[in-house]
Amino acid sequence: MKEPVASRPYWPDFAGMPKDPTSGLKSWSWALERLEQSHNYWIATSRPDGHAHLMIVWGIWWEDAFWFSTGPNTRKAKNMAAHGYCSIGTDRADEAVIVEGIPHEIKDRAIWKRFAGVYNGKYGGDVEPLLNSCGGNVYRVEPRTAFAQDEHAPNFAASATRWRFKEP
């Protein structure tokens, strides 16, 4: 994947941004480090009636996307079937990275095996028997837009960064 393009997020009510449009922006490598190292991730989906649903999942940043699994009857699986978008957030709000994207259900069991190997390396155990026994789903969330903000940056507001990804 080509590195996404960094810019300022839309923040119309804040007048304190640096005049230099690139000053303070976070690098994509900074975001990747947090996406790869997060233990828990927040996933936001929309219920069929439009109400928000927020949940915690375990997952991995792998092959330029966020991957996770869930049972086919979970609220998030039903929501993703009804609405083809979701948002993923890392577990540390002080160094936040949020990815908005399109979830794709992966049905190829050969890819499941590869996913399970990487997932097991991160979390331990063996996820594959669980996936097979409960009829679990594996999802790959293809990023469209990502955001970051770093409370530890010299200028917190200037660290606000948006990345846009090229359409496949």
Image (tube, grey):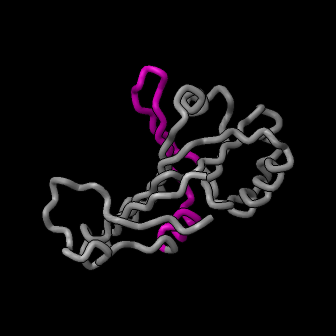
Magenta part of the chain: 30-57
Q: Residue at x 40, y 27 (%)?
A: 51
* Residue 108 placement (x, y as % from top left): 82, 42
Q: Residue at x 28, y 55 (%)?
A: 10
Residue 92 visible, this orientation: no
* Residue 124 placement (x, y as % from top left): 73, 59
Left or right of residue 137: residue 66: left
* Residue 85 placement (x, y as % from top left): 51, 38
Task: Say whether residue 41 is magenta.
Answer: yes
**Who is closer to the viewer here, 8 or 55?**
8
Q: Residue 5: name its quadrant.
A: bottom left
Residue 110 visible, this orientation: yes
**Who is closer to the viewer here, 129 or 49?**
49
Left or right of residue 69: residue 134: right
* Residue 34 placement (x, y as % from top left): 51, 67
61 lies above or below 46: below
Left or right of residue 82: residue 131: right
Q: Residue 33: name its quadrant.
A: bottom right
Left or right of residue 138: residue 141: left
Position of the N terminus by quadrant: bottom right
Q: Residue at x 76, y 54 (%)?
A: 115
Task: Say whether residue 96 is magenta.
Answer: no
